Image (spheres, rainbow, N blue to C red):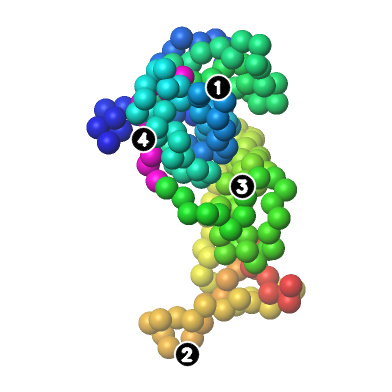
Amino acid sequence: MQFLRDLKRTHDCGALRADDVGAEVVLMGWVNARREHGGSVFVDLRDRMGVTQCRFDKAVDDAVHALAADLRNEFVVAVRGKVISRGGNLNDKIPTGAIEVEVLQAEILNRSKPLPFQIREDVNASEDMRLTYRFLDLRRPNLQRILMTRSKVNYAVRNFFVENGFVEFETPILTKATPEGARDYLVPSRVNPGRFYALPQSPQIFKQLSMVAGYDRYFQICRCFRDEDL
């Protein structure tokens, strides 16, 4: 593990391009796929930013090649290697398809047991199974795209309002029940037995208080808790 103490990740698995050929890099991620060809082991290393092909060549290092033979899907791996061109074997389906990393050092950071379902777009698993193993489900590329898109939208919304003189507030989550169009979600009070907080169905009262206090431009990306028998 001295390798890990000495080095930090230099790039994510979706960052490398043809301009990086010749650079020495450190990547860390999950084994997405593994295959053998012509005495070399090829591993698709994945993180949330993309996939990079890594080549474990026996002619480069016997120990590294032997380690690659032990790899399985979803093992967590750290590799140090040199970026090389894939020449005529380009993969135009991924942004990193013009290059691969010739591995010089590698460490298995964590092993994986057999998976309840595969980490891919068209997962064949029930909703209950996916929720039970939510940490695996959230590794799937389509869900990662959704979460990253949501993050970018929130960032753009915040920037727009801040640039136009709005102030962002976070209104309370535990409050008293107020008449709304749905039933309240209730939370028992630990220090006042028999009494309850209500989760807010909207931030209406709090935003009205902020306007009375002089904050005429307010915004919030808030949660609205409405018990509508769904």
Query: Which segment is the magenta one?
Result: 102-110
User: CB under 8 Å between callouts 3 and 4?
Assistant: no
Mark 4 residue crowding within 10 angstroms, few (<14) / some (14–19) / many (20+):
some
The overriding secondary structure of the stretch rendered in magenta is: strand
Q: Position of residue 160 (x, y in %)?
A: 64, 35
| Amino acid found under the numbered disc labelled 4 | Glu
Residue at label 2? 194
Residue drawn at the location 45% of the way across and 22% of the way down: 57
- Between disc 1 and disc 3, whose residue precedes? 1
Horizontal and vertical percent for residue 20? Answer: 51, 12
**Amino acid tagged 1:** Gly
Q: CA distance from mark 4 to mark 1?
A: 23 Å
Image marks 1 and 2: residues in contact by CB distance under 8 Å: no
Q: Position of residue 13 (x, y in %)?
A: 52, 29
Task: Kindly identify which residue carries mark 1.
Answer: 38
**Answer yes or no: do the residues labelled 4 and 1 have beta carbons within 8 Å?**
no
Q: Is residue 143 above or below residue 225?
A: above
Of mark 1 and mark 2, the one earlier in the sequence is: 1
- Determine which residue is flagged by label 3: 119
The mark tally for this picture is 4
